[in-house]
């Protein structure tokens, strides 16, 4: 049985000026699954995410969504497909409240005026649907939230817009133990609700706690994409640091050339 991935990338190249950052990347993310994207600092994870989100145009390769080839040239194109990217710091506006953040740029109106009560109800329903209970008031400014609560609002915003694919770039990087556990639980729930979820993390415990699949980038190349249940922590660490582990990863000749 072969399932069509929600997102499939084939042969993606990306350069910044003369520097090629992504080489011939293949990557898939499936509905109902969490796919971890791992790799060392500078491996190209955020660049790949920005290509998925339409911030960086790809130089070459295919971008397929639900099995159909698509052109993604801008964040608007990505959003129209149902792709939402949650960045650690850029996701929210501090001076706005939770509801305002969730509807930023896509406000509901009744005639000429903002339909605050509808927006508040929709925001509340979304947070309830995700079993979020730690937020006291939807009208509190995001600047007053903890890191974990901010991340929760950013994720809820992605869910509110009927996304099909949610990409989380290091959502737990700045969080403590309890908040990390809450965010990971939410990540798992998103996938259990049928979304395709991509999680970037440097923390192997987080990766193994929630992921169904693991994709390891090494120096801008996809070293391997495997089922989490088929690999050990040590193998994933080896893929991240060496680009291969045992029979995982590209086969190379002694001088390092791919065969
Ligand atoms: N806008 C840009 N212009 C030029 N080079 C860039 C740009 N963005 C990223 N790079 C380079 O691309 C490479 C990959 O960076 P990227 O941010 O994708 O890594 P990463 O895997 O997300 O790392 P980290 O774990 O540190 O977040 C780096 O060498 C970086 O310097
Ligand atoms: Mg990054």
Image: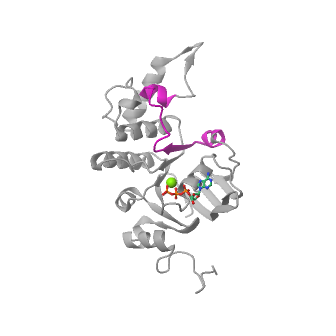
Left or right side of 166 for 180: left
- Which residue lies at the image location 39% right of the left edge and 31% below the top edge? 143
84 within the magenta span? yes
Nearest the eye: 83 or 19: 19
| Image quadrant containing the N terminus | bottom right
Nearest the eye: 144 or 199: 144
Left or right side of 243 for 19: right
- Which residue lies at the image location 58% right of the left edge and 42% below the top edge? 82
Nearest the eye: 148 or 33: 148
| Image quadrant containing the C terminus | bottom right
Provide residue 254's location: percent of width, then percent of height. 58, 87
Provide residue 83's location: percent of width, then percent of height. 57, 44
Asked if residue 135 is positioned above or below residue 21 in the image, the reply reads above
Question: What span is in magenta?
Answer: 76-103
- Which residue lies at the image location 58% right of the left edge and 64% below the top edge? 220
The residue positioned farthest toward the top in the image shown:
112
């Amino acid at each position: 049985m072969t399932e069509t991935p929600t997102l499939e990338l084939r042969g993606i190249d990306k350069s910044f000026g003369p520097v090629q950052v992504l080489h011939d990347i293949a990557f898939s993310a499936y509905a109902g699954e969490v796919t971890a994207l791992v790799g060392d600092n500078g491996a190209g994870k955020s660049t790949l995410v920005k290509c998925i989100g339409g911030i960086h145009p790809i130089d070459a390769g295919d971008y397929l969504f639900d099995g159909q080839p698509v052109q993604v040239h801008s964040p608007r194109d990505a959003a129209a497909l149902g792709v939402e990217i949650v960045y650690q710091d850029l996701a929210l506006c501090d001076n706005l409240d939770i509801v305002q953040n969730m509807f930023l740029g896509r406000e509901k109106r009744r005639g000429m005026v903002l339909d605050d009560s509808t927006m508040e109800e929709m925001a509340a329903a979304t947070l309830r649907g995700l079993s979020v209970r730690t937020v006291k008031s939807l009208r509190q400014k995001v600047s007053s939230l903890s890191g974990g609560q901010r991340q929760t609002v950013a994720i809820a915003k992605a869910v509110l817009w009927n996304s099909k694919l949610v990409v989380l770039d290091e959502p737990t990087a700045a969080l403590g133990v309890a908040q990390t556990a809450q965010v990971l639980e939410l990540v798992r729930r998103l996938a259990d609700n049928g979304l395709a979820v991509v999680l970037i993390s440097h923390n192997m415990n987080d990766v193994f706690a929630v992921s169904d699949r693991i994709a390891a980038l090494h120096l801008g190349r996809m070293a391997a994409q495997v089922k989490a249940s088929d690999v050990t922590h040590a193998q994933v660490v080896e893929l991240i640091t060496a680009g291969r582990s045992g029979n995982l990863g590209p086969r190379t000749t002694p001088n390092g050339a791919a065969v």
